[in-house]
Image (tube, grey):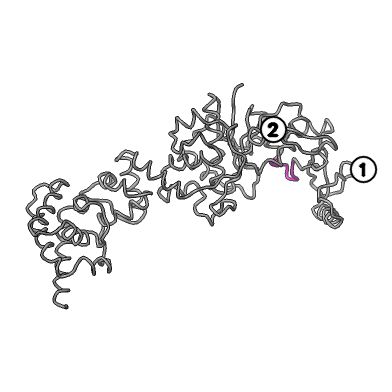
Amino acid sequence: MNVRTRFAPSPTGLLHVGGARTALFCWLFARRHGGTFVLRIEDTDRERSTQASIDAIVDGLQWLGLDADEGPWYQTDRLALYREHVERLLREDKAYLCYCSKEEIEAMRAAKRARGEKPRYDGRCRRRTGSPPAGVDPVVRFKNPAGGTVVFDDLVRGTVAFDNRELDDLVIVRGDGMPTYNFGVVVDDLDMDVSHVIRGDDHVMNTPRQLNIIAALGASPPRYAHLPMILGADGQRLSKRHGAVGVMQFRDDGYLPEALLNQLVRLGWSHGDQEIFSREEMIARFDVADVNRAPAAFDYDKLGWLNQHYIRQAGPERLGVLLAGQLERMGIDVASAVTPSSIAEIQRDRARTIVEMAEQSRFAFEDYGDFDAGAAKKHLRPVALEPLEAVREKLCAIAKWEPALLHAAVIECAEALSLNLGKVAQPLRVALTGTAVSPAIEFTLQMVGRDTALSRIDRAIAYVRDRSRQS
């Protein structure tokens, strides 16, 4: 079989986690089988579809590296094809014009609800006779079979069956001539030779309707796989209240695309106890038939752990570019004697995200303002004056500002004063960064640079002297 999958989002918002997982599973299935991955934009909802949403979808897929082999195709460019198929259904008496007004339909549904019945359309225009009402743009409804059962073998859920009596005559073309979702998707999937439809399980109820339309068109259906819902940590459907759900927000929050892909691929699918997958491993091992039917929970803690892993694996030049970009978004000038790539190399083991790395590196690019009150109270006491003055003298004598020599200078100072390393390094750290937390002292010195380091030490010495006078 020539495997062809498609990702077919409606451009009415961002590319969210659920859509990104669907795109990934479609992409992996196609890659695993040497097939084709098609991107189709279902933009027939003119009121809600926007170019900004299209851009967000395309940008999100590009950031994740889910490159399409075909497309993007746009449904609004394919209207003639839909007209051709609906005219055929009308000619073959498999569809009909419906002139019911919105008020008439609502009254019909209200009456059904009052009788305790499901508010399905009752097919009254199937039996309408006489001249059509004037001034009404009719919709086209599909003649759903009145009896029988629709059965399909879902690759995730197993055998699924629907009674046709539970399905009404759905609208397939609106009054303005635009196809509805269930009709457009059928025509497109058939025309594009889609072999496997992989999508969220919120579409399960659409599948019997689509299968009936496919049968009416005399075509063979694709295979279907409906993916389980994605939940937040509280067991509720994933939404904004759980955190970022738009793919590009994860980028802006400092996550790497490979970390998000790794998290997405584990939402409902697994391969033994393996947690970390390279792209090549995903392609080699993914099978949609192995997807679990149960809902999958999106774990932000796991994403952070994965992101830290991939930060540690990334090359320093790439990390430097990412760090510089984040610093610039924070309004920080990255012009420095120490390059962002050098700082990223120092910080890679300490940060879970690029944003965290940037926050932890601010002191290397801009003045930190006041000392942290707690850190100053503990480490910039009068007793710190002698080690600060001594370490400044040692640092002034260093010809080459590099970690090994800087580390040796601090060690020599501590030994000369018969102090443990912390009694020298911690006051120095507060002097350099304003806080008591930073990378190893030699790397902190390297990040700050010689001139700035000496200036900040002078400031700390003045602070300690002033504190001594006040005590």
Determine the secondary structure under disc 1. loop
Residue reaching furthest bottom?
A: 470
> Which residue is at a point 21% across and 50% down the rendered structure image?
443
Q: Nearer the viewer, residue 112 or 313?
A: 313
Q: In terms of secondary structure, what is the magenta stretch mainly?
A: loop
> Which residue is at a point 69% across and 31% down the rendered structure image?
153
200 on left or right of 69: right
189 on left or right of 316: right
354 on left or right of 230: left
> Which residue is at a point 17% across and 65% down the rendered structure image?
460
Q: Residue 50: image x %, image y %?
A: 58, 47
Q: CA distance from mark 1 to mark 2?
A: 30 Å
Q: Nearer the viewer, residue 460 or 340?
A: 460
Going from N to C along the chain, the mark reached first, 1 or 2, is 1
Write down the region rendered in magenta: 173-181
Which image quadrant: the N terminus? top right
Q: Is residue 178 magenta?
A: yes
Which image quadrant: the C terminus? bottom left
> Which residue is at a point 52% across and 28% down the rendered structure image?
31
The circle drawn on residue 187 is 2
Q: Residue 123: image x %, image y %?
A: 85, 44
99 vs 451: above or below: above
Q: Nearer the viewer, residue 151 or 359?
A: 151
The circle drawn on residue 129 is 1
Looking at the picture, which amino acid does disc 1 mark? Thr
168 on left or right of 328: right
Q: Residue 103: image x %, image y %?
A: 81, 55
Q: Is residue 330 magenta?
A: no
